[in-house]
Amino acid sequence: MSGWLYLIRNRDLYKIGITKKFESRMRQLKPDNIVAKFYTSDFLKLEKELHNRYKKFRIPQTEYFRLEQHHLKEIKQRIYQLDHTMIIILGIIFKSLLIISLLFFILLFVFSLNINDINIVFLKSIVWMEKISFGYSFISLFLHSGKYLSFLSELKYRFLKLIIFIVYALIFRIASIFFQ
C-alpha cells in the first residue's frame, strides 16, 4: 500500500501528514507552501518516524509542529535519501575508501619511521590494513547510521558497510600475497 508523505506550511506552523490522494488533500488544507512531498510504500512508517523525531515541537492533539529551518532541512534530507538510495551507497563507498586510505597512509608513515626497507613497510601496512578492515567490518554492524532510516533500511546500510569492508580486507589479503 503506497501513499504520500507531505510537509506543508501554514503561517509559522508545519504539518507532517500522509494521504493517498495528494491533490484533493491539498485542496482541503489550502497550505501556504508545500515544503516537501514523497510517494512511498512506507508512508505510514515514515510519518510515525518524523512525528516521533519532532514530538518536542508538536502542537498537542494535532499534526502541526513549530519547526525551525534546520528541522526542515533534516526532513528534506531524509526524504531525499529515501528517494535516492544510490547516493547513500556511493556515500558509504566514498567514506569507507577515504577512511581506509587515511589509515593506510598513517600506517605507512608509522612503519617507515622504524623500518628502512620500503617493501617491508608496504607488507606490514597491508597486513595490518587487512586486519583493521576485517575488524571494522564487524564493528560496522553495531554502529548506527545516524540517518533516521527505517529498521530494514538501517539493516541494509549496516550490511552494505560490512560487505564493503570485507571486500577491502580481501583486497589487502591479495595485495599482501604480491608483496611477499
Image (tube, grey):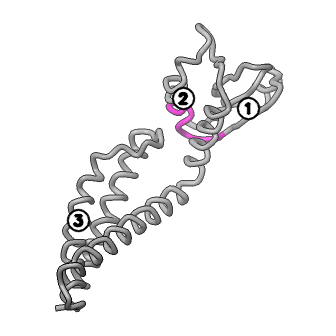
Residue 43 belongs to the span the image colors magenta: yes
At 37% across and 69% down in the image, what residue appears? 102
Asked if residue 72 is positioned above or below residue 85 in the image, the reply reads: above
**CB contact under 8 Å: marks 2 and 3:** no
Q: Is disc 3 surrounded by few (<14), some (14 to 19) or many (20+) residues within 10 Å?
A: some
CA–CA distance in space, label 2 to label 1: 18 Å
Eyeballing the image, is 116 above or below 68? below
Q: Quadrant of the N terminus?
A: top right
Provide residue 154's location: percent of width, then percent of height.
39, 45
Which circle, 2 or 3, is nearer the viewer? Answer: 3
Q: Earlier in the sequence, mark 2 or mark 3?
A: 2
> Closer to the camera, 18 or 52?
52
User: In terms of secondary structure, where does tag 2 sit?
Assistant: helix
Q: Residue 14: x, y in percent?
A: 70, 23
Q: Mark 3 touching mark 1, by CB under 8 A?
A: no
Which kind of residue does numbered mark 3 sit on? Ile
Dot label at residue 132: 3
The percent position of residue 32, horizontal first and vertical second, equals 83, 25
Name the image quarter holding residue 136.
bottom left
Residue extending furthest toward the top: 61
Looking at the image, which residue is at 53% across and 17% down?
56
The residue shown at (60%, 44%) is 77
Q: Mark 2 to mark 3: distance in Å?
A: 36 Å
Q: Which residue is mark 2?
A: 50
Helix, strand or loop under label 1: helix
Label 1 sits on residue = 22
Tag 2 and tag 1, C-beta contact below 8 Å:
no
From the image, which quarter does the C terminus lie in?
A: bottom left
Q: Which residue is more in the foreground, 38 or 143?
A: 143
Amino acid under disc 1: Phe
What kind of residue is marked 2? Leu
